[in-house]
Amino acid sequence: MKVRQIITILFIGGLMFSSLVACGKPEEIDTQDETGAITEEVSDSASQTQEEVTIGIWELGTETDASRRYIEEAISGFYEETGINVTYEFISWDDAYNRIVAAIASNEGADILQMGTTWVATMISTDAFVDLTDDIGTIFPDEDAFTPGAWATSGFGGKVYAIPWFSDVRAMVYRSDLWAEAGYPNGPQTWEELQTGAQKIHELHPEIESVIGLGGQGFSHYVGSFFWQNCGDFISPDGGTATFNVPENVQATQFWVDRIVDDGTVSLTNSEWTYDDVIARFWEGDVATMFASPAFVNNATEEQLAVLEGKIDVTAQPAGYNDCQYNFVGGSDLMLFKFSTHQEEAKQFMAYLTRPEIQVLKAQYENDSPAVKAAYDLVDMTEGYWPGFAVAAQHGFHFPIHPAWGGNVESLVPELVTDIWTAIVSGDYANSTVQNILDAINADAQQKLNDAGGAPTNYDSPWPVPNI
């Protein structure tokens, strides 16, 4: 597949998942010196002394005060240690397509690219990035240093092209007071406990709009978690066959549909909710259980935090019928352009960003879960909700790291959610609905796989296995 075709597939739908993040090297950027004054750095190699090296990193998204403070503090510490300059640039979603395509086509741009995990495999297929396999265990930490879900995003076929930077861990966030009242003080650990406990809460507290919050619009990462919790997945281990409709996935989907149509612990109003709507209603007391990232605290007011203090806990999502206990892990990795003329220095900075203390720095500023296990052992991560996210991170799993996934097969996941909600809300739901929808989605997924060339060379992605 040609580079432009691959990149076009990558950005189908205007970059649907906001978990995609990228980075780059600007020609010119304003930074702050120690006094707070704005200074201008020019990344023109001609203006540098022979000893100076400047590398650049592109980040995709809106620059916030927190994100700027984090990256500038990290850059400052790296410069003090190495003498290597780092410039950064935040690139808007609207500009991302043109900037990355132009960089690959012209061999000009940043040294380091921050990349959303679901898009890593497609980027690998462009052949525009450095193979980092031989640097694992030397320049970069070895596999065991990373949480399992984060490491799963580093590449496929035994090759590493992406270094995990931070994770979007979707843990179970729940009202511990309500679940204790229902008989589960540590939250539900299995689907059976989730069903029984949610029904009890629903009976005791009919004023709660939806005991379990599942957004029907936008992000649908929870679908992956539900499949994996029942030991299923979206694509066969060899990468050639779509498996949306295998028995494990049909059973998993039916379980959650039953929470809507049978016992009402997932209310019909969820069909109109986005992920942010679920979080907002959680803080308002209208949702008792949700599957969220650490940034859920960003949505709360001081008053809401005070009201629910001591009444919220976090842990891994419950296990399905087949003894698999997994939850979604996404986030972003770091990739190195082949055209970089300072690859070794860029690798140093990438490695610096994986240090436990720098991982914690990002968590403190931006509420991003660390991708490195040791970060969770540092004192700042042993307080608040972080211990629960550390547990969830150890149960992390990820969408297939397959070239046909990002922006292609991946687009069918929210379609699955929409189709199911539409059938229920419209009154067209029947006992065969789940199977029929999954069969239709799977046929589309198989066609997309075939159109993309089928299984990649050396692809091997084992499915979840029982872990409880």
Image: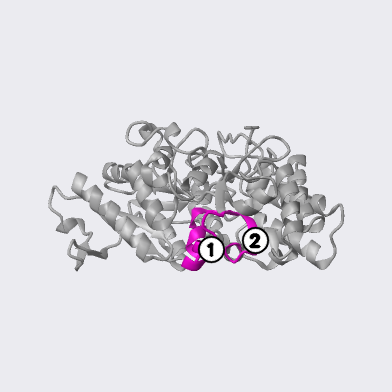
Q: Residue at x 86, y 52 (%)?
A: 432
Q: Residue at x 36, y 42 (%)?
A: 356
> Is 140 positioned to the left or the right of 207 in the image?
left
Which one is earlier in the sequence, the residue at label 1 or at label 2?
A: 2
Regarding residue 304, the answer to whether it shows in the image is yes
Q: Which label sits on residue 287?
A: 2
Regarding residue 234, the answer to whether it shows in the image is no
Across and down, in percent, residue 410 comes to 62, 53
Query: The C terminus appears in which quarter of the rendering?
Result: top right
Across and down, in percent, residue 205 comes to 72, 60
Magenta-colored stretch includes residue 22: no
- Towards the viewer: 320 or 301: 301
Q: Quadrant of residue 467?
A: top right
Q: Which label sits on residue 307?
A: 1
Across and down, in percent, residue 234 comes to 66, 44
Q: Is residue 71 above or below residue 92?
A: above
- The magenta region covers 282-311
Q: Is residue 221 above or below residue 280?
A: above
Colour style of the rendered protein structure: one colour
Q: Quadrant of residue 106?
A: bottom left
